[in-house]
Amino acid sequence: MNSIGFLLPIAIGVAAVFLGFFLWAAKSGQFDDLDDPPERMLKDD
Amino acid sequence: MAPRGFRFFPTAGERPFGHISSMKAGPPHSGEPLGAAEAASASVSPAEAAGEAACPHCGTAVEGTTNAFCCAGCEMADAIIRGAGLERYYADREQPAPRPEPLAGGWNAVPLEVDPNTGQCVMRFSIDGLRCASCVWVTENVLGRTIGVSDAIVSYATGRATLRFDPGKVTLGELAGRIAALGYQPRLLGEESAPDCDLLLRLGVASFAAMNVMMMSGALYLGWFGGMEARFVSLFQWVSLVLATPVALWSAAPFFVGAWTGLRERVLHMDVPIAIAVTVLYAHGLVGTFGGFDTYLDSLTMLVALLLAGRMLESRGRRRASEAAVTLAASVPMTARRVTDGASIETVASSDLQPGDEVAVGAGEELPSDGVVASGNGSLRVALLTGESEPIQAAPGDRVWAGTVLVDGSLVISVTAAAEDTVISRMADDLRAAADQGVAPSSTDRIAPWFTGITLAVAVATFVGWWMAAGVGTAMSTMIAVLVVACPCALALSRPLAATAGLGAAARRGLLMRSADALLALAAVDTVVLDKTGTVTAGALDVVSASDADLRVAAGLERFSRHPVALAVVREAVSRGIPLPEATDVRETPGVGMSGMVDGVSWMLRSGGAGLVVLEGADGHRGIIRLGDRLRVDSRAAVARLRSLDLSVSMLTGDHLEAARRVADASGVAPADVEAGVPADEKPACIRAMQAAGSVVLFAGDGLNDGPALAIADVGVAMGTGAASSVLAADGVLAVGSVGPLAVGVAAARACRRAVRGNQVRSIIYNVMAVSLAAAGFVNPLVAAVLMPLSSAMVVWGASRVERQVSAWEGAS
């Protein structure tokens, strides 16, 4: 059970990194337009 | 070439020769230049023998052997596209471009926020008429290759352009002008997505915490059964507390702010019980973690995450109203040319104009202020104010308004009101106020005070009861259990979820309701009153009858004219599939008509009185083109569908009885339900009378004079193409030029009302049961963790049925 002592910080740390990515993405406007990027991909340019 | 040629035939077949086609103008042919064989076999035109060609830009058929442009606008669009090196557009596109229309002005008056470091500014606006991926590609690249623009993105899905440009090198007006020159219509947007982003961040943090706290709690609950060392229990609790802290203090802040604002105004709305629950849960968690007993922190984080998700759905629906305000404010030009001492002209800011000043306005310009015409003549387009498409004549002594466009002529205006005092700025202010006010008390908010009161009373009673029976400790924990399970999570979610589903279902079908309240009001309607002009009918000048031969000659003469009659004639010729002939020696005499040579014969086109245009040929031929207001394509079907919903449909018009009867017959409104000859200022009284008789009235109309009637009706729906003032007064807007979506809108509203009521009933039943269990002492953190998401899932299920019910209704009718 003592492994919890370091597994727990790792688990939460990894989750926190993903939260950080999410906050960065939201702030940089990546969720402002969810409909267009799939269409844009189909245009070769 | 094969598939394009293939498409050509069915399209042409739908519009056989002489068929009186709909208002929906648009080139009947594919954009590809046609080979002679194809043209001959299609045989839609009286002149196919001459060899048929199409306008290379918009695909309108024109006579001649080469592909001549149908109008100067198309030629310009082609020059822009080729000038930017984007010829590929013509090969790639799936549909021909729309015919370019003149740009409604005011773009240069839009305030820009310039970044002081880069000298650039970012502007978002929407573009109408994008039909395919190639349209997006060409607009994006034309904009991107304009000098001064560093970045241009056009979104196909949302129809929005985002531009980064240097306002010192290129003005917004020039950029908008280029889009309009291509045949697409740029439109200003008012909204920015900032508040949404804030909620999204809060939701992100809350969801992250909820998942991780749930993981801790899972371990703790298992520990109950399997046994767990005290130090691990304590570790998990401490970690949960650390994770829950930002959720309680930061993510949940909007609920505290809402509750506080409500309390200061002495209203108990839904945020109050939520704020109480969050406070109690967090305080209990804090004490529990230090004191070493079980906490509800998992319920706290889950609750906040779910409620934030509901709130975000709500805020998405609330964006549209401010759009029109910006468009209005932007239609007044920034500068005016002031005439001083009757001779010299100086350029001043429009906002500096004083009543009594005289300003000069030239053709094609917007008026900078309200005023009276001092000298000059011209025709004014006042569509912004009245929705009337035909320009009105302005002569000395006439009143004129800021933001209207002088189509031709020139005027000197004596200013009566400038800047904020103009009619149009007052309209914009009203609209902004309406958009800000937005949050009307809803049925959920009416339940909230009762709900909060009863919960608090039950909590106190529980505490007192258990205190007598089992002492303070048990009494405290039972009371907290009551407050926890009583948190109206499902109740608070029931309306936003159902309303979002209902608003979305209506919006996808062309009816944009301003708010959830407006949508729910629509569900109660039992009488539909339709305005005639511009609502049941198209409201625009249109060719009612003309022979194809006359129309062909007239369209040739008027091909390059911007006059409304000319536009109507050319539109009709295009929709009948008549190639536009070449006219030479065309001369336009303002106020008299057009003359020119077609097929070697000299023709004269002149007005023949109200709604009549007379075509006279040098060879003695005399033809008459009748113009008028035509029934919208699907009005008849729309009336029938409204009837099928047990709504009584009537028509209200200022027009005389005979014209009203004719339209009523054609649209299927019973003659008894026609109120004709009602002047504009009596329409509200008419609606009041119906309301006094017990009807709940939906009024659909357009135009400046419909504003009061729209406001008085229980639900007012304006035509999106109508006057800005009517859009402002209305609870909803028809995004498509037809009354068709009204019926399905009512169906969506009814489905939404059923869902809201069902959800409210379900969540109240849930709460009564859960509170009883808690008061009896049966609820512990594990039970709470299971019960709360269950109640929310129930509400989501209720809302998810709205779209299905609307589709089912559509399928059935």
Image: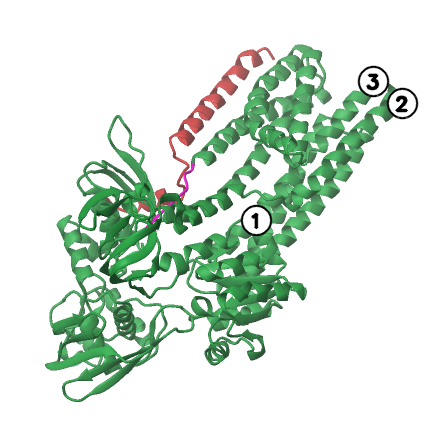
The residue closer to the viewer here, B524 or B629, is B629
Q: Is residue B685 above or below residue B193?
A: below
Q: Colour of chain B?
A: green
Q: Residues within 10 Å of mark 2 (few under 14, many from 20)?
A: few
Chain red in the figure, letter: A
Looking at the image, the residue that sits furthest to the bottom is B620
Looking at the image, the residue that sits furthest to the front is B341
Three-letter code, disc 1: Ala
Residue indicated by mark 2: B469
Which percent across, then down, holds residue B477?
77, 22
Residue indicated by mark 1: B516
Write down the quadrant of residue A29 in the picture. Answer: top left
SS category of the residue bearing label 3: helix
User: Which marked residue is nearer to the observer: mark 2 or mark 1?
Assistant: 1
- Chain letter behind tag 2: B
Which percent across, then down, holds residue B529?
55, 67
Write down the quadrant of residue B209 in the picture. Answer: top right
Q: CA distance from mark 1 to mark 3?
A: 45 Å
Specify start and end residues of the magenta stretch as a single range.
B187-193
Asked if badges 3 and 2 are on one and the same chain, I answer yes
- Chain letter behind tag 1: B
